[in-house]
Image (spheres, rainbow, N blue to C red):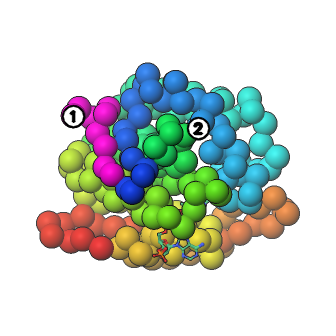
Amino acid sequence: MNARSERAATGSVVIEVLGIDSAMRELTGLVVLLKDAVDSGASVGFLPPMAEAEGQAYWRSVVEAVREGSCVLLGAREADGTLVGTAQLLLATRPNGSHRAEVAKVMVHTKARRRGIGRALMLAIEARARGLGRTTLVLDTRRGDPSEGLYTAVGYTLAGVIPRYARSANGALDPSALYYRLLTEGDQP
Ligand SMILES: CC(C)(COP(=O)(O)OP(=O)(O)OC[C@H]1O[C@@H](n2cnc3c(N)ncnc32)[C@H](O)[C@@H]1OP(=O)(O)O)[C@@H](O)C(=O)NCCC(=O)NCCS
């Protein structure tokens, strides 16, 4: 299997790398996922209600990053082909960060949560990171969100909390938790 068709089984769900063509084909499904997360109150960069055009523009920018080689995009797909989750590995592009990447936009559709799909996405992201020699992984998430449980469960360490980091739908400025994970041989969660 090549990088674009790499798969890891997760019960009836498969995790796959979405290359440029498959990401473009999945644009509608990706917008559905982002809109579902945003409109259900997740802190993923946008505020509800999310417009279709805003989602389209965002995913097109992600496809551009995939094209440039600075983003690895993963999708989680049900047996019937429906996209139920996604995650990104953003590769640091500066010379001093060629060992580093950021995990971003880990999202599972509200109807598919607590089935292990988020965990499978995180493990697949980690496998890709290892394969690319990206051994320092960082991420941030809103303090107190379910995502913190996921990141802790797969071996991330809390580096600190920044107050008043991101705005929520109700106008509040919420704290953000910064996490990291160092990938060393034999270090599995
Ligand atoms: C965070 C998210 C991706 C988790 O996806 P998921 O498929 O439901 O997660 P999993 O079923 O793989 O859960 C794996 C582990 O994470 C933790 N976890 C997941 N959801 C949790 C929750 N609501 N509360 C507490 N712990 C949780 C648990 O340890 C869980 O293991 P368990 O089910 O054996 O207890 C999902 O809730 C989501 O899409 N949230 C909205 C988007 C978002 O905020 N993403 C983070 C952006 S930085």
Residue 90 in sight from this viewpoint: no
Q: Which residue is mark 2?
A: 30
Looking at numbered disc 1 in the image, what kind of residue is underneath it? Met
Instruction: Tell me where residue 160 appears, x and y as whole percent.
Output: 50, 76
Calculate the distance from the C-alpha at mark 1 to the C-alpha at mark 2: 23 Å
Q: Is residue 50 left or right of residue 43?
A: right
Q: Quadrant of residue 171?
A: bottom right
Query: For this rendering, which residue is in front, 132 or 33?
Result: 33
Instruction: Tell me where residue 8 appears, x and y as whole percent.
Output: 31, 49
Query: For this rendering, which residue is in front, 153 or 110?
Result: 110
Secondary element at image label 2: helix
Q: Is residue 25 left or right of residue 91?
A: right
> How would you rate the neighbour count of disc 2 (Cα within 10 Å): few for under 14, some for 14-19, many for 20 or more?
many
Instruction: Tell me where residue 64 appears, x and y as whole percent.
Output: 48, 26
Q: Quadrant of residue 75?
A: top left
Looking at numbered disc 2 in the image, what kind of residue is underneath it? Leu
Quadrant where the N terminus sits is top left
Instruction: Tell me where residue 69 appears, x and y as whole percent.
Output: 35, 31
Q: Residue at x 70, y 45 (%)?
A: 35
Q: Quadrant of residue 154?
A: bottom left
Secondary element at image label 1: loop
Choose the circle earlier in sequence order: 1 or 2: 1
Magenta residues: mostly which secondary structure? loop
- Say if the magenta span includes residue 87: no
Q: Name above or below for residue 133 compared with residue 61.
A: below
Q: Residue at x 60, y 36 (%)?
A: 29
Query: For this rendering, which residue is in front, 54 or 118?
Result: 118
Which residue is the extreme one toward the left?
A: 185
Q: Which residue is mark 1?
A: 1
Residue 33 in sight from this viewpoint: yes
The residue segment tinted magenta is 1-9
- Say if the magenta span includes residue 2: yes
